[in-house]
Amino acid sequence: MVYPFRCKPIYKEKIWGGRWLEEAFGRDLPGEKLIGESWELTCRPDEMSIVEDGDFAGQTFKEVIQKYPEEILGKRITREGFDPFPLLIKFLDASDRLSVQVHPDDEYARQVKPGELGKTEMWYVLDAEPGAKLIMGVKPGVTRSEFAKSIEKGTLHECLNEVPVKPGDAFYIPAGTIHAILEGVRIAEIQQNSDTTYRVYDWNRVGLDGKPRKLHIKEALEVIDFNRTGINPHPGIILKKDGWQSRLLTACPYFAVEELKVERMKGQISPERFEIWMVLEGSGELKIKTDNYRLAKGETWVIPATLGNFELTGQVKILKSYIPDLEHEIITPLLAKGYSKADLGKVGGLNDMIKLQKANFERY
């Protein structure tokens, strides 16, 4: 029988990392290293999650989903295929600034490395020091030629769009978007299962080995989308129920992400697809049939598709992610509730789809 479970975090030492996860979530971080990333759920040959609790404890995440594909991942995800597993889930602590970087889309990534995915991602800001900012896209009017010349002249900062941030802000970052987390920002990251990054600029610093980190300017210039300008956080759509509320932050073909604030909630997991719950604040008790699970701040839970009805009580904020059936789960239900296209444009991913007239929006 499957059940909700957690995996052991995989910590990544980074020159820009810190110890925030220790103080915020009570994590037992290794040594005195600067930890920039905690990979909460990963299914990659180079990094594989290990289940932490229950009957699956000690098994790899891949072993478990291969043994119980439909029970854990759901009917639709199993039918559509799950190799590679579609998501990579992280917490990031940027005590210092990250490199200015970009990720390729699926087509470009596969040309470089067969079987690799592109990297579309979303960020949810957990903590931001006063004055903290992100780099999101280029400034309006910047061309590829001007961008390349600014790299040569050392004036790249003049081309980049900086956005002030605060806790609760959410950003949709499709492949091709130039971006960087600047110092003093901590985020939850939901992304395609890819670790392909093209660095454009690294602030003239050296890596943990004392050498300058590799830049990928040629590749970056090939994949940057120079139409990605004027990017701001997406406010999302809030759906209020008795005892809880959901804020739909992002909905794209790769994932949907909701912010849940719960005191008491009765719901049902769709048998079509699994969910990932990142507990951001507070604590709660999840009841499924006769079993109870205690959810605590900083934990990440895999919620199998076949769990059916559940009850969640407490004072808890959760970031829920899943692979959506965009039309039937999100677009059609929201329009049926009376939301307009303009309302849907407040959701990261749907905003871009409306602009590009994708997903047959002209039918609505």
Image (cartoon, helix red, strand yellow):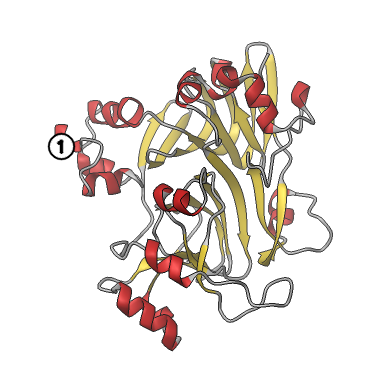
Locate residue 176 relative to residue 322 in the image: left or right.
left
Residue 99 location, x and y as percent? 54, 69
Q: Is residue 151 above or below residue 166?
A: below
Residue 345 visible, this orientation:
no
Locate residue 333 relative to residue 25 in the image: left or right.
left
Residue at horizontal 52 percent and vertical 37 percent from the top = 86
Residue 147 visible, this orientation:
yes
Residue at horizontal 67 percent and vertical 50 percent from the top = 38
Where residue 313 sits, quadrant-wise, is: top right
Q: Mark 1: give few (<14), some (14-19) or many (20+) Cα within 10 Å.
A: few
Q: Is residue 107 above or below residue 81?
A: below
Q: List the single residue furthest toward the bottom.
A: 153
Q: In this figure, which residue is indicated by the disc labeled 1?
A: 362
Instruction: Give the quarter of the figure containing the C terminus.
Output: top left
Q: Amino acid at mark 1?
A: Glu
Instruction: Give the quarter of the figure containing the N terminus.
Output: top right
Viewer-nearest residue: 94 or 120: 120
Number of callouts: 1
Residue 127 location, x and y as percent? 57, 58
Residue 80 location, x and y as percent? 45, 26
Q: List the single residue furthest toward the right.
A: 31
Where residue 226 sits, quadrant-wise, is: bottom left
Q: Secondary structure at mark 1?
A: helix
Locate residue 148 relative to residue 274 in the image: left or right.
left
Residue at horizontal 27 percent and vertical 44 percent from the top = 353
Residue 8 location, x and y as percent? 74, 40
